[in-house]
Amino acid sequence: MNIQSEKILRLAAVLGAAAVMIGAFGAHGLKSAFEARQLDTRYLLGIYEKGVQYQFYHTLALAAAGLLLQHRPGSKWLPRAAWLFIAGILMFSGSLYLLACRDLLPFPVGWAGPVTPIGGFCFIAGWVALLAATFEREKE
């Protein structure tokens, strides 16, 4: 396994495990915290769960990019796709987690709102980079 592929697969494993933990925390810990503060639990959990959902999808895409990179170690587009997926997870999902929990946090998170669409753009760009990788010619 090449080093770049190994790093990407390790990050996918970490982000996948984190998605499970973050999702479990939302389902069990946040629900009661939202209810205790009489917040709109259904709405806020919906935002939070959307972050978890997209983190899972793009963790799988990240793992796919890492596995493909094992077979195409010279690809310039597969690592780009991987890093765009990582950036998207951090910005899109991360901002949704912060925004859903804004009333529970001791600091302002209004800045996270504009970050969400940038993360979404990273997801789209990651998929386009994955597409571009399919047009690369193998070096002989």
Image (cartoon, rainbow, N blue to C red):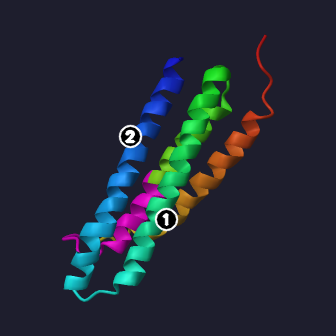
- Asked if residue 86 shows in the view, the reply is yes
Please indicate whether residue 31 sits to the left or right of residue 2 in the image.
left
Q: Label 2: few (<14), some or many (≥20) within 10 Å?
A: few
Please indicate whether residue 25 sits to the left or right of residue 58 in the image.
left
- Residue positioned 66% across, 22% down in the render: 71
Badges 1 and 2: C-beta atoms under 8 Å apart? no
Counting from the top left corner in percent of width and height, residue 49 is at 43, 68
Counting from the top left corner in percent of width and height, residue 25 is at 29, 62
- Residue positioned 40% across, 69% down in the render: 48
Mark 2 highlights which residue?
Answer: 14
Mark 1 highlights which residue?
Answer: 116
Tag in front: 1 or 2: 2
Counting from the top left corner in percent of width and height, residue 129 is at 68, 42
Region rendered in magenta: 90-107
- Per the image, label 2 sits on a secondary structure element best described as helix
Which label was assigned to residue 94?
none
As drawn, which residue projects farthest toward the bottom? 38
Where's the C terminus, which quadrant?
top right
Prevailing SS of the magenta stretch: helix
Residue 92 is covered by the magenta coloring: yes
Amino acid at circle 2: Val
Q: Nearer the viewer, residue 134 or 106?
A: 134
Q: Nearer the viewer, residue 106 or 4?
A: 4
